[in-house]
Image (spheres, grey):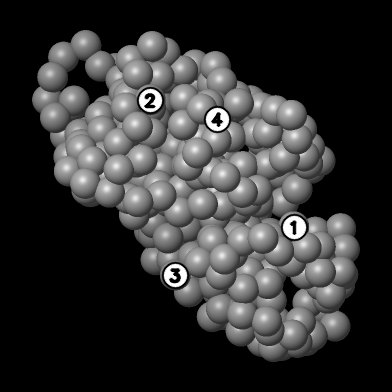
């Protein structure tokens, strides 16, 4: 797997694969706590190590553990890597239509218990999952194999996730049922309309919950409050606009719904640890060798 990823991810940063929804990530240096925004996805690390920090919980994903996110989540990520042993990973965006079909089939069979739903899970990488990962990487080296074989292997990987050691919890989360499902619906609304005025009470009403219950269940899924989640989503998208599209801080602030550029700058610095201009310069230097199509994925899985 490592040899294939060296070929598929020749440069530091992101590399889009031959299959839509699958990307490679390479980091040649360690990265301390970095705010990231992950879409619903499966992240498989083949070399190096990453840790995700969500609330008071730590999620390890490395050559022995993969990460699954059933909802979009902002959190902090830490990377262990070096030029001699870069961190090499593959991120597979979850196709909810495929997931729903698999969940329906599994729910009709016996012996698959449902656990408590969780937004993010780190789980051991078993031999069947490792084998499917290797076959997917191999298929993605060939345009024709990527077109014909890779989609079926991605479906198999989703199936392996759903029947894995923590598959019950993953399936419960991906099924988007009950209170978790209502929060997942609210998260989709936030990500679709983050630049609009989003009132928490209205979000709660849209998913059929009282404001107090919405706060409780929202924090149980995301480990943060609705207001902080909305704020972090806006800041991530603003950073992407400044790096990818060359927007000024004031222009990006307006695009994501801020009325005050000074408030945006204060909250940006508090969140990312640097003022907008400094953060953008650092990100651009990091991504200097990448083509624009790869820079466009900045706000997606790391």
- Whether residue 112 sits left or right of residue 202 in the image: it is left
Q: Is residue 161 above or below residue 37?
A: above
Question: Where does the image place residue 297, in percent across and percent down from the top left?
Answer: 54, 61
The structure residue drawn at horizontal position 21% and vertical position 11%, both measured from the top left corner, is: 111
Q: CA distance from mark 2 to mark 1?
A: 29 Å
Residue 38 picture location, percent across and down:
55, 49
Query: In front: mark 4 or mark 2?
Result: 2
**In this view, the mark in front (1 or 3):** 1
Q: Residues within 10 Å of mark 1 (few under 14, many from 20)?
A: few
Residue drawn where x is 41% and y is 49% of the image: 17
Instruction: Report if residue 62 is visible in the image.
Output: yes
Of mark 3 and mark 4, the one earlier in the sequence is: 4
Relative image position of residue 146 (x, y in whole percent): 27, 44
Nearer the observer: mark 1 or 4; the answer is 1
Tally the numbered discs: 4
Question: Upstream in the sequence, badge 2 or badge 1?
Answer: 2
Q: Which residue is mark 2?
A: 134
Question: Which residue bears the numbered disc 1?
Answer: 286
């Amino acid at each position: 797997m490592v040899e294939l990823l060296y070929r598929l991810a020749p440069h530091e940063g992101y590399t889009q694969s031959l299959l839509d929804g699958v990307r490679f990530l390479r980091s040649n240096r360690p990265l301390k706590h970095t705010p990231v925004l992950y879409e619903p996805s499966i992240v498989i690390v083949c070399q190096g190590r990453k840790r995700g920090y969500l609330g008071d919980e730590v999620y390890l994903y490395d050559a022995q553990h993969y990460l699954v996110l059933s909802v979009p989540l902002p959190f902090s990520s830490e990377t262990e890597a070096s030029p001699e042993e870069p961190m090499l990973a593959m991120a597979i965006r979850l196709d909810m239509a495929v997931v729903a079909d698999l969940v329906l089939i599994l729910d009709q069979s016996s012996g698959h218990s449902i656990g408590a739903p969780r937004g993010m899970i780190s789980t051991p990488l078993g031999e069947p999952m490792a084998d499917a990962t290797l076959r997917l990487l191999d298929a993605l080296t060939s345009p024709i194999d990527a077109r014909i074989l890779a989609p079926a292997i991605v479906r198999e990987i989703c199936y392996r996730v759903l029947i894995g050691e923590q598959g019950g919890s993953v399936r419960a989360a991906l099924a988007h049922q009950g209170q978790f499902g209502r929060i997942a619906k609210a998260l989709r609304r936030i990500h679709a309309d983050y630049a609009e005025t989003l009132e928490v009470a209205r979000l709660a009403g849209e998913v059929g919950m009282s404001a107090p219950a919405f706060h409780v269940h929202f924090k149980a899924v995301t480990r943060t409050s609705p207001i902080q989640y909305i704020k972090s989503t806006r800041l991530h998208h603003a950073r992407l606009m400044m790096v990818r599209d060359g927007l000024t801080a004031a222009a990006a602030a307006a695009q994501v719904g801020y009325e005050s550029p000074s408030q945006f700058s204060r909250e940006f610095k508090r969140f990312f640890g640097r003022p907008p201009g400094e953060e953008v310069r650092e990100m651009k230097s990091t991504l200097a060798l990448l083509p624009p199509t790869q820079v466009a994925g900045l706000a997606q899985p790391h």
